[in-house]
Structures are given as structure tokens and as C-alpha cells.
């Protein structure tokens, strides 16, 4: 596995090195020893699978309060534009974001540290993402910010005809002058 630092402190783009032969390929998605050697001591306790039916589905920007979580996200079908936004107000990369295309073809994974919000937009129909989580989901502890918050300035590759949940459509902006609640993580 190859671990590359991103624009966000503590976030990594991780690329597996597939073994390929005439039968197909085999890739390692997670290895505790390799994560630890890269300085990531996270213990994952939960795995989630997310299916997205249509291109232009946008989820995020989400994080969990109370028991913040590290995430490792990979796309196992299709392609997504995946984003990690630093909302840790005391971080040297506060309000910066890292964004990468994750796909079944490139086999990349994005490691998102505690205190960062996560979101993505699907670039194909029928996208599937696999999440490794360091904390159990706690109802009522989920939070987030608007995907189009100018405080972050994310250059989303898809902006027309987005498919959003009502919850994501009503997330606050970071800046209270834009109607947000001004809360920040950590």
C-alpha cells in the first residue's frame, strides 16, 4: 500500500497495489500493520456499504460529534469525487479540503481523520462505496455543513441536477452570516 499525505493535516490518499494475473486481480483494502507503519494507529470497529443509484448523487459534508470518527473510504463500483474538509478550528489546515477521484479502477482509498467532514458526488450511475469507521454510529451525533459552503470553496465537478437528501440540503453553513449555526468540530 502507498500512503500519500494530502492537503489536509492527517488525511491520506492510500493506493493498494493489486496482484493481477489471467484470473483477474487481488488487492488488500486494509492492513493494520501497514496503516501503523504509515503513522495511522486507527482501530476500525464498523464497516458500512453505501449504494448510489444515479450520477450526480451528492452526500455530505458529514461528520460525527460527541465521538468523532476516523474513516477510510473506497469506491468499489463506479467513480466518485470524494472530499475531506478540515473543520478542526485549531488545525493548521482548518477549512482546507482534499479531493480525489476514487474508483473501482484506481483502487484508491481516502483516510479522513477525526474532526474532518466528508462528502462525495457520484460521477457514474450505480456507484458503491465501502467505509471503515473507527467509532460506532451514534444516533443524534451526526452533523455537517453545506456542500456549497463558500468557506470551503470546493470545486465540485458536477453541479447541475444534483440529487441531495432533504437533510443534506438543509445543512448549515460554517459562517453564521449565511444562515449556519457556526459550530465547528473539535
Image (cartoon, rainbow, N blue to C red):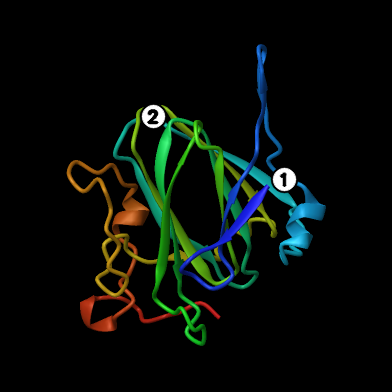
Nearest the viewer among 150 and 7 is 7
Q: Quadrant of the C terminus?
A: bottom right
Of the numbered discs 1 and 2, the one sitting upstream in the chain is 1
Q: Residue at x 37, y 66 (%)?
A: 145
Nearest the viewer among 143 and 10 is 10
In the rendered image, residue 34, in percent from the top left (x then y), is placed at 77, 53
In the rendered image, residue 64, in percent from the top left (x then y), is placed at 55, 65
For marks 1 and 2, give the CA distance: 26 Å
Q: Quadrant of residue 160?
A: top left
Q: Nearer the viewer, mark 1 or mark 2?
A: 1
Residue identifier under label 2 = 53
Judge from the rendering whether residue 124 lies leftward or rightward of residue 116; answer left or right: left
Residue identifier under label 1 = 30
Furthest toward the right, the residue is: 33
Q: Residue at x 74, y 54 (%)?
A: 44
In the rendered image, residue 130, in percent from the top left (x then y), is placed at 58, 40
Nearest the viewer among 64 and 154 is 154
Furthest toward the top, the residue is: 22
Query: Label 2's element?
Result: loop
- Indicate which disc residue 131 carries: none
In the rendered image, residue 101, in percent from the top left (x then y), is placed at 42, 45
Q: Quadrant of residue 69?
A: bottom right
Judge from the rendering whether residue 176 lies leftward or rightward of residue 185; answer left or right: left
In the picture shown, does residue 16 fall above or below 33?
above
In the picture shown, does residue 115 fall above or below 77?
below
Amino acid at each position: 500500500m502507498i500512503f500519500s499525505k494530502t492537503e489536509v493535516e492527517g488525511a491520506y490518499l492510500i493506493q493498494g497495489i493489486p496482484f493481477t494475473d489471467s484470473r483477474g486481480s487481488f488487492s488488500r483494502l486494509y492492513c493494520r500493520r501497514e496503516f501503523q507503519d504509515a503513522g495511522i494507529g486507527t482501530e476500525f470497529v464498523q464497516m458500512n456499504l453505501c449504494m448510489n443509484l444515479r450520477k450526480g448523487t451528492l452526500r455530505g459534508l458529514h461528520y460525527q460529534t460527541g465521538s468523532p470518527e476516523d474513516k477510510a473510504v473506497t469506491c468499489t463500483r463506479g467513480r466518485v469525487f470524494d472530499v475531506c474538509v478540515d473543520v478542526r478550528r485549531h488545525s493548521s489546515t482548518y477549512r482546507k479540503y482534499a479531493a480525489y477521484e476514487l474508483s473501482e479502477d484506481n483502487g484508491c482509498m481516502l483516510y479522513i481523520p477525526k474532526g474532518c467532514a466528508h462528502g462525495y458526488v457520484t460521477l457514474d450511475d450505480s456507484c458503491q462505496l465501502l467505509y471503515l469507521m473507527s467509532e460506532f454510529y451514534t444516533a443524534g451525533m451526526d452533523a455537517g455543513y453545506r456542500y456549497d459552503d463558500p468557506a470551503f470553496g470546493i470545486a465540485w465537478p458536477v453541479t447541475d441536477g444534483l440529487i441531495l437528501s432533504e437533510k443534506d440540503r438543509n445543512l448549515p453553513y460554517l459562517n453564521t452570516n449565511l444562515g449556519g449555526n457556526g459550530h465547528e468540530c473539535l
